[in-house]
Image (cartoon, grey):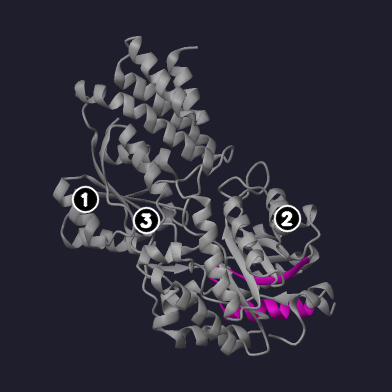
Amino acid sequence: MPPVPFRERLSRGEVLVGDGAWGTMLMARGLAPGTPPESFVLERPEAIREVAHLYLEAGADLITTNTFGGTALNLSGYGLADRADEINRRAVALVREAAGGSAYVSASVGPSGRLLAPVGDTDPEEVRAAFERQIRILVEAGADLICVETMTDLQEARLAVAAARTVSAEIPVLATMTFDPTPRGFHTIMGVSVEQAARTLQAAGADVLGSNCGRGSDTMVEVARAFRGVTSQPLLIQANAGLPEVRRGALVYPETPEFMAARVGPLLEAGVSIVGGCCGTTPEHTKAIRAAVAAYRSR
Amino acid sequence: MDPMESLAAALQRGDDAAVREHTREAIGLGRAPAAILNQGLLAGMGVVGEQFRTHQIFLPEVLLAARAMYAGLDVLQPLLERDNVPMLGKVVIGTIRGDLHDIGKNLVGIMLRGAGFEVIDLGKDVPPERFVDAAVEAGASVIGMSALLTTTMVGMKEVVATLEARRCRGQIKTIVGGAPVSAEFAREIGADDYAFDAASAVTRVKALLGVA
């Protein structure tokens, strides 16, 4: 872990840089479509190390573990449930190794992939238990932060944050949801407003609130302002490099590093403490974001 | 209120008990099962789809409405079969290989069934060849594919390519959907159409097959 604790750096008003996408980076390193990215932790650890190094060199202060779909609940769909603990433990170790003392190991916890009752048929207790099991391993393995991300169901997001708090009273917990613009303001597809997200996740014990994935960085500036309007907690924003387009059969994310870097100023203006990237972003984006943060701070 | 309107309204509220009751009531009043289906259940679901598209309601409301629609369909199904309401066509649906998300795909299945299609649901994590095998075996005229992940959506292209290789592209139409998917993506991979949501999937599949 870096010498200065995470919370202290945020409370000093420092701006931190998150890393970028993992799924798309691993696809570029041979992850076949339809294969769970978490399987690469076991099968291609050198690819994970390489991506972590690239993000570290690009200037990221937080390096994400490749554990987004790492609940046993989600991995069971790929016949990997019995290797869930091993995947989560190794995933932390790989990033830990690469990050050394220069970056925080941010352990990713994504949605369970289930639809919770009463709307769906999965018992919330089953989901809660799956999160707790995953997070316990992540914390034991030495993660510095727990990052609950890409959530759309508030009940599920709350269960994940609360599970992290059950496992550890101290570990900083970051919680971000994915919003769409609607005529009534930003909502997740499950109908959660920014205000509801902020109130509920803060109450559940999240240190940092915000948003990831979504439509692209212009929309994220507005989401950040919406958050700042309803909470004084530190904010984390990790936008996609826009929505993917297909060009000559390949997926292309339209936002260039320069484009995203130009939105860093407005994000910091809105009071964001951590800026990173989501789907389609690369170490080049991280570098550009890092430079834009430095430029903003030295104005 | 007209029983069809009560039925549609109950469906929009996601009240499955009321939907069941109003469906029975309409049957008791001698309404034709096909009319109950079209003017009651499908009309209600159409409104729900439109409200979802315009962000007036969100996914939970849509899912509850779909569940209510199923409750009505259960009551109606034996009568529809007795009346021998002709099937509009056979559609094979599934979520593409590697993708375990099936909320949207299930909604599409419910809506297509409700609209009078025979639906063969292959489930999730479906390999490209399986879509084609199932469609050929069943004599289906449409394959509907869903993806939620950008890491899996490219698999849809393989289905189109497999159809091409087996020289069935054209007889078997393809339609794609899911959060990261767009009309542009559909064009790019050579799919015949794209549907934004479950309600429009019904309209688009009907248009593909030239049925009203």
Specify start and end residues of the magenta stretch as a single range: A272-295
Q: How many marks?
A: 3
Labels 3 and 1 touching (C-beta < 8 A): no
Q: Residue at x 57, y 89 (%)?
A: A97
Residues tagged by mark 3 and mark 2 found on one chain of the structure: no
Report helix, strand or loop for mark 1. loop
Identify the mark at residue B187; answer none if there is no mark: 3
- Residue A101 position, x and y percent, is 67, 89
Q: Is A172 in the magenta?
A: no
The answer to whether the residues at label 1 and label 2 have Cβ atoms under 8 Å apart is no
Amino acid of disc 2: Ala
User: Within 10 angstroms of label 3, few (less than 14), some, or many (20 or more) residues?
Assistant: few
Which mark is on residue A210? none
Disc number lying in front (3 or 2): 2
Give the residue at x 69% y 48%. A196
Give the distance between the C-alpha atoms of the residues marked 3 and 1, in whole angstroms. 14 Å
- Label 1 belongs to which residue? B170
The residue where tag 2 is placed is A203
